[in-house]
Amino acid sequence: MPESAWKFLFYLGAWSYSTYLLFGTDYPFFHDPPSVFYDWKPGMAVPRDIAVAYVLQGSFYGHSIYATLYLDAWRKDSVVMLVHHVVTLVLIVSSYAFRYHKVGILVLFLHDISDVQLEFTKLNVYFKSRGGAHHRLHALAADLGCLSFCLSWFWFRLYWFPLKVLYATSYCSLRSVPDIPFYFFFNVLLLLLTLMNLYWFLYIVAFAAKVLTGQVRELKDVREYDTAEAPSPKPRKADPQHRLPKGQRCRCRNEGCAIEQEQKRETVSSNNEQNYEKTREARNPTYALSEGPTGKARSYGTDGRSTGGLSLIS
């Protein structure tokens, strides 16, 4: 839940700021996409309000690479998500360096809205069942959020993104600046971003199909691993490389991780044995243990003779 709350707050603020730049200022980029290259020239000044958006987004995606590897829950699409964050960060840095910042604002605006709705929906899924009660308001908000997320993903990322961004960068850029630098580099990254949008759209279609066929009755993130699908193999007890320091979670961060469950069982078993010995000694004062010459536990009676093993002397 904290992961979704943090992402929701960031994406909401970032998308609101992008919306302000496109519709609250004199920038015509959204209504006239070819205008992003009308006055382009190398080394041109970047407006301060756009530079602020770039600093915030660049910092966020730099952190997101680290978070995907070490902080966030590992999901079925985490590898693709990691590639997405790297591509996005390269696009942010390169578009600023090449002075394609006007296109960058369009790209950010068209993508962030879907992330706002995704994290909003996930938060309400978490909130709808808590304290042993079902909260209908959060359930309704989750359903509406899921519907708007599906629609916005198609409209913003699969319709407007090619219509406004790819059209401007692949066609209009050559008409305005015939020898524009880094043309193929920039467009290849944008096409790769489009392919990843299509990849995630397949998850959306698969989830919608399960809902329509009655296979799924409750909203859930289909990218999450079920316990039976956990990718971590069950470790052998004697394998020291699978031992975790006390209090530390496994790197996979999956609920029901086989490594964590095995170590918990060993800890509980060890604690039970210790508690049993303490209880037995407390109830029988003459019960004692000593280390024999072989290193094995030996017991001694009241006469001082070894009994060769564990015994109770009355």
Image (cartoon, rainbow, N blue to C red):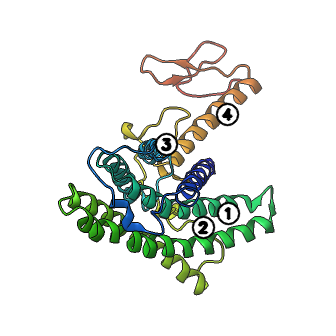
Q: Which amino acid type is shown beneath numbered disc 3?
A: Val
Q: Which amino acid type is shown beneath numbered disc 1?
A: Val
Q: Who is closer to the viewer here, 240 or 139?
A: 139
**Contact between labelled residues 3 and 4, with CB atoms less than 8 Å apart:** no
Image quadrant of residue 166?
A: bottom left
Q: Earlier in the sequence, mark 4 or mark 3?
A: 3
Q: Which mark is residue 276?
A: 4
Q: Which residue is mark 2?
A: 220
**Contact between labelled residues 1 and 2, with CB atoms less than 8 Å apart:** yes
Q: Work out whether 147 lies above or below 280.
A: below
| 10 Å crowding of disc 2: few (<14), some (14-19), many (20+) | some
**Contact between labelled residues 4 and 2, with CB atoms less than 8 Å apart:** no
Q: Is residue 202 visible?
A: no
- Residue at the image position 48 percent from the left and 51 percent from the top: 258
Q: Which mark is residue 125?
A: 1
Q: Which amino acid type is shown beneath numbered disc 2?
A: Lys
